Image (cartoon, rainbow, N blue to C red):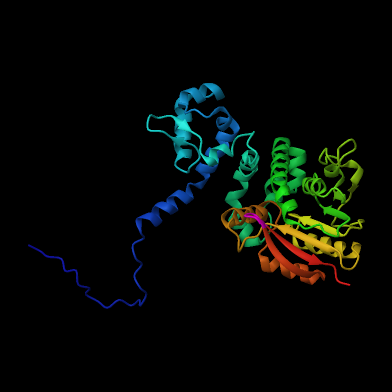
Amino acid sequence: MTTVSTTPTHTPTSTSTPTATPAPQSAMRLRELVFGAAIAAAVRAAARLGVADALGESPATAAELASAVDCEAKPLHRLLRALSCYGVFAETQDGKFVHTEMSRLLREDDPHSLRYISLWCTEPWTWQAWPLLDEAVRSGGSVFHDLFGKGFFDYLHQDAHESAHVFNRAMTTSSMQSALDVAELLDLTGVSVVADIGGGQGHVLASLLEKHPSVRGVLLDLPGVAAKADPRLREGGPLAERTAIVPGDCREAIPVQADLYIIKNILEWDDDSTRRTLRNVIAAARPGARVVIIENLVDDTPSMKFTTAMDLMLLLNVGGAKHTKNSLVTRMADAGLEIGEIRPVNPYLHAFECTVPG
């Protein structure tokens, strides 16, 4: 009988430490991560089908929900089973489905709805762009023009009207939800005029004017955006008499005099735009004016998994980047702003209080 020795017959030439066998939970977690597209697609499918809207307060079977949303029962059960593994819906012991905190956020009527954010982050173009992330990392720039023959926003508005609609709804929803947090945070003592620079439809401005009846406001954004301002700010709206809507590009000029300038989520496209915008604010503002810059951060925040993912999406589609606290402070200081307190607005946003120097 031949025996096989387990003792090495030669001395290893490598001094490296043998790799330990990975823990079972680490291997399983990596498997889950590489199938992340499946769960993202499942959330998108549920949002597009309207499953969360169809599910009321009573438990329902997949067949009952399938009838309500006009789809096949067995595939819907498979979809709901997968989502339930991640806490989006829950399955009862008798095979019915009920809401969870997360599934309610997919409802159109939920005040904190993330339905359009969920759709926006999984739009058709994203599935074409994500596989090219390694190319974006190599080059440091957007892959969008190579994919579609034009820039991101041109593509949205010229070739992908449904995506443009989803984008607008997502940004509107997000802005409306954070506007109340911003209005709650900011002290407007001594402020007569507040300007929302690149403020989109002006939800933050409207919330501030509603809270402070003696304050006047200015909304500046691109002409096509400013034309669709919050109805509260436009002619006939309850805040119209205290609001000036100024069409313009903050990267070119800011023809606005105010005591407080708010710049929210517009300093992430590229460094040149950031420099020009901050330079234009300082050129327009009187010495001592306040500038509050509000941004998502990729560090020192409880939302890092979300914001770092959005950071990679910005790299892909426009070549932009989310900021770290230090990178934003550096850019503000380089522009000449005097930086004061930095405060969280909510788990996703930080506010940087600044002053225009004398």
Start-end of magenta stretch: 345-349
Horizontal and vertical percent for residue 347? 62, 55
Residue at (59, 44) in percent of width and height: 127
**Is 303 on the left or on the right of 270, as rendered?**
left
Measured as percent of width and height from the top left, residue 354 is found at 78, 66
Residue, far left: 1
* Residue 264 highlighted magenta (yes or no): no
Residue occupying image coordinates x 48% and y 51%: 33
- Count the marks: how many? 0
Instruction: Answer left or right for 303 relative to 206.
Output: left
**224 left or right of 99 in image:** right
Front-most of residues 261 and 327: 261
Nearest the viewer among 42 and 61 is 61
Viewer-proximal residue, 106 or 75?
106
Identify the main secondary structure in magenta.
Answer: strand
Q: Quadrant of residue 342?
A: bottom right
Rendered view: 287 above or below 122: below
Residue positioned 89% across, 72% down in the render:
358
Q: Nearer the viewer, residue 259 or 335?
A: 259
Q: Position of residue 14 (x, y in %)?
A: 35, 76
Quarter-of-image position of residue 107: top right
The residue depicted at 87 percent of the width and 67 percent of the height is 288
* The N terminus sits in image quarter: bottom left
Inspect this view and state whether residue 233 appears: yes
Q: Can you see residue 70?
A: no
Q: Is residue 7 above or below residue 258?
A: below
List x then y, in percent, for residue 308: 60, 57
